[in-house]
Image (cartoon, rainbow, N blue to C red):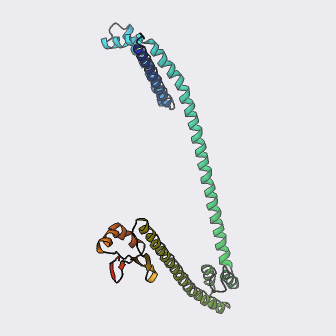
């Protein structure tokens, strides 16, 4: 007969559980002490705690008039001296760890602060340089003669100029220079010509933009129409796979916005079955405005708009 090993296994499990709980408690205590010792107030708290417990145990042990609960606490504490020594050892080991963590934190904060300060100084230097450049540019701009302003405006109008469409140029920069040429300056006639040219370019630019926009809209409309035609073809294949022998599914009408199902056995029951609310919503989202089911001369339809 085999011996009963269950009590031994249970005892081993209890020992392992106690060791695990003790280890976790020790780690938690070390973490608390390490965090407290990172600050002067925390270090004082730890010292006060150790000294307070020592004094309390000493009073409970040696003072004849100590309260009963204090004496009982002292006896229990001294009876468990192994735990006391372990706790003090863990505390002593955790304090240097906390100091090291505090030192690392201070170094990190100092490096981060120095980095932020350097970045701020770099930004300030860039801003100062930008203001200096703008001030120099303004000073140079004010010193320009009417002839120089006219030359600069003419040059600005050549920037990114499209000779085919007769558009382009830095119109704002050209206007800025032309605005500095007075009516009494010899260059005022050429100034007026360039200002008219700027106005003409803006009008031509609006026309080109409108033309390109309409072209893009037409291309998009064509693509969407092609997508509707492809959907109709896919729906035709779907019906065949489902055993519904339709004669064909088409996207017809202007921009292919009518979804037409040709089916000899089309009926109101069939039409209601293929047009649930979900399908109607999907077809409407694709741009279909009408769905039809045709059987010879008869037709069942529903507007989707």
Q: In this rendering, is residue 142 above or below 18?
A: below
Where residue 190 sits, quadrant-wise, is bottom right
- In the image, 201 versus 48, the foreground residue is 201
Q: Position of residue 252 (x, y in %)?
A: 44, 81
Q: In this rendering, is residue 284 above or below 298?
A: above
Q: Residue furthest left?
A: 269
Residue at 43%, 70% in the rendered image: 235
28 horizontally vs 181: left or right: left
Q: Position of residue 110 (x, y in %)?
A: 59, 41
Residue at 46%, 25% in the rendered image: 24
Q: Quadrant of the N terminus?
A: top left
Q: Quadrant of the C terminus?
A: bottom left
- In the image, 159 versus 1, the foreground residue is 1
Where residue 204 sits, quadrant-wise, is bottom right
Q: Position of residue 9 (x, y in %)?
A: 43, 16
Q: Residue furthest bottom?
A: 189
- In the image, 152 versus 286, the foreground residue is 286
Q: In this rendering, is residue 36 above or below 158?
A: above
Residue at 56%, 87% in the rendered image: 203
Where residue 284 sits, quadrant-wise, is bottom left
Total labels: the figure holds 0
- In the image, 49 versus 25, the foreground residue is 25
* Residue 145 shows in the view: no
Residue at 56%, 26% in the rendered image: 96
* Residue 281 shows in the view: yes
Q: In this rendering, is residue 9 above or below 129?
A: above
Q: Position of residue 56 (x, y in %)?
A: 39, 15
């Amino acid at each position: 007969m085999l011996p009963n090993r269950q009590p031994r296994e249970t005892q081993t499990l209890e020992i392992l559980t106690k060791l695990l709980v003790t280890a976790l408690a020790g780690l938690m205590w070390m973490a608390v002490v390490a965090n407290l010792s990172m600050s002067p107030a925390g270090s004082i708290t730890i010292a006060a705690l150790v000294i307070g417990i020592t004094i309390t145990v000493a009073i409970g042990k040696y003072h004849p008039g100590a309260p009963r609960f204090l004496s009982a606490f002292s006896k229990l504490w001294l009876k468990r001296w192994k735990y006391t020594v372990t706790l003090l050892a863990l505390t002593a080991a955790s304090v240097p760890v906390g100091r090291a963590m505090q030192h690392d934190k201070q170094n990190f904060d100092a490096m981060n602060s120095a980095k932020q300060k350097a970045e701020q100084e770099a930004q300030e230097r860039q801003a100062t340089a930008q203001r200096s450049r703008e001030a120099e540019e303004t000073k140079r701009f004010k010193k320009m003669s009417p002839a120089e302003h006219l030359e600069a405006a003419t040059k600005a109008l050549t920037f990114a100029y499209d000779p085919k469409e007769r558009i382009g140029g830095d119109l704002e920069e050209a206007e800025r220079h032309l605005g500095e040429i007075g009516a009494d300056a010899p260059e005022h006639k050429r100034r007026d010509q360039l200002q008219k040219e700027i106005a003409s370019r803006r009008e031509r630019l609006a026309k080109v933009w409108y033309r390109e926009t309409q072209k893009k809209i037409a291309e998009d409309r064509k693509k969407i129409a092609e997508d509707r035609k492809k959907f109709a073809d896919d729906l035709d294949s779907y019906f065949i796979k489902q055993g519904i022998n339709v004669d064909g599914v088409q996207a017809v009408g202007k921009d292919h916005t009518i979804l037409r199902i040709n089916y000899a056995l089309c009926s109101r029951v069939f039409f209601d079955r293929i047009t649930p609310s979900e399908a109607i919503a999907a077809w409407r989202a694709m741009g279909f405005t009408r769905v039809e089911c045709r059987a010879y001369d008869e037709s069942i339809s529903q507007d989707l708009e």
